[in-house]
Amino acid sequence: MGEVTNPPRIAVVGTGSGCGKTTVVCALLQAFCNRKMAVSSFKCGPDYIDPMFHQKIIGTPSRNLDLFFCGEDMVRYLFCRAASGSDLSVVEGVMGMYDGMGADTQTASSNHLAMTVEAPEILVVNVRGMSLSAAAVMSGFVQFAPNRLAGVIFNGASKMMYPAYAKMAEKVGLRAYGYFPRIPQAAVESRHLGLVTAGEIENLKEKMNLLAKTAEETLDLDGILALARSAVPLTYEKPVLPAPLPHRVRVGVAQDEAFCFYYADNLELLAALGAELIPFSPLRDPLLPEKLDGLYLGGGYPELHLQTLAENKTMRRAVQQAVESGMPTVAECGGFLYLQQSLAGIDQKAFPMAGALPGEGKMTDRLVRFGYVDLMARREQMLCQKGESIKGHSFHYSDTSHNGDGFLARKRKGEYLCAHVGPRLYAGYPHLYFWSNPDAVARFLTQCAGYQKEREV
């Protein structure tokens, strides 16, 4: 028998990418936080950047919920665990609400997630350049497939046109929860992996408060909160996890502007299974923290900081020595590139990196690999036994001369080899989702414990 909880919750879904979901969600989060409410936030899918904006607003980690990475039972558990104690939980969708893992399925879509956590859905419709056609759009989304659509927010609408849009919504069975006008002063720039990161925007708080002020004026916040409180009780099962280590190990986590892509749930699983997480900066710190037993180098934007990374010779040498000495290491995407011999920017000017692995990386002008991968181990190594799998995703404009061959990356269409692996190493392009295989995390930390014993001899 599972446990039952009923956190107030909504899912903000959209007609497609660029319709204004992130703007609306950030406005809602800031507005409800300004009302002194305890708010939790979630992002559908593997994106790192939107949760970083959420986290800057609410002051606590934002979570990714992804039905490819783990099944419905685990997603319900992760949602309920993080939503516990919140006055409101907001789930931001991805792409269009029915867009899933492929053009022919809504598996892992925003709607699939909303149905899984039984969250009432609010559809964001960008009505710029649209009048009566907005009714056809709403009607199509309501009728296309089973859903939990309860309301709509009109992005890009004017005060004058809003009553007409609200009547259209009523005719297709949706409640209008307001409109959101265009606010150029609150615009956020973008780059090749999406929006710039929250930490790069100096006046972010001012922009978010401008969105919140607008939300108070143009959205029915009380109605949205009432909708969230109308959600039905949710049943979930606690997963059986590996036993934590008897003694904690110290895992250094690269965290700065160059290495900033981490799933909050990944870090918390590491901590739950016995890791003390020690942040450090490959950009600014001269050396690794003392007495480390393992390294976790996540992705980010090393290509934007090549000269600074290269000039920090003492850190590069420290990382090289740590990996070559057998310190257990997980390095994903940008962290993987940092371990190689060199990395060239889009101008093809190469800078030296840590030099712990073979390979020269370079930026390209196109997306090299994109999408979900099921990684099957081709031989026994630190994270997985031969034939075992862990799930992840790739999204990168760079390429390297040495991708590695420790895993077979299986996609819906096609497969390829990737990742350098060893008894104490995972280094490859795919970003891993630890909850898809908690045993892999336990194995990593077991190797860290072994390294700790060797270090203390």
Image (spheres, helix red, strand yellow):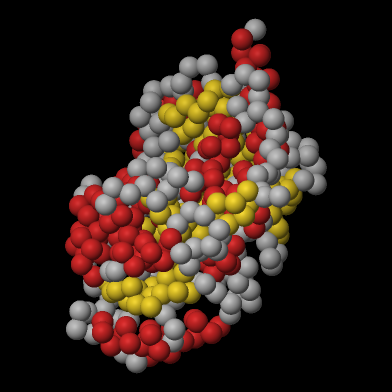
Which of these two is toward me, 196 or 282?
196
Which of these two is toward me, 96 or 374?
96
User: Residue drawn at (60%, 46%), measured in percent from left and top?
Assistant: 432
User: Residue drawn at (68%, 38%), measured in percent from left and top?
Assistant: 241
Q: Residue 304: x and y, percent?
A: 37, 46
Query: Would residue 238 be found to the left or right of residue 275 on screen?
Result: right
Q: Residue 419: x and y, percent?
A: 65, 44
Q: Residue 264: x and y, percent?
A: 49, 43
User: Residue drawn at (43%, 29%), measured in percent from left and top?
Assistant: 280
The picture quadrant where one finds residue 176 is bottom left
- In the image, residue 235 above or below residue 147: above
Q: Residue 140: x and y, percent?
A: 49, 86
Q: Is residue 310 visible?
A: no
Q: How many marks?
A: 0
Farthest residue toward the top?
457
Q: Is residue 212 visible?
A: yes
User: Residue drawn at (66%, 14%), measured in percent from left and top?
Assistant: 453
- In the image, residue 127 above or below residue 447: below
The picture quadrant where one finds residue 327 is top right
Which of these two is toward me, 397 or 120?
120
Q: Quadrant of the C terminus?
A: top right
Which of these two is toward me, 228 or 208?
228
Query: Would residue 416 be found to the left or right of residue 336 on screen?
Result: right
- In the image, residue 62 above or below residue 91: above
Query: Would residue 53 be found to the left or right of residue 71 on screen?
Result: left
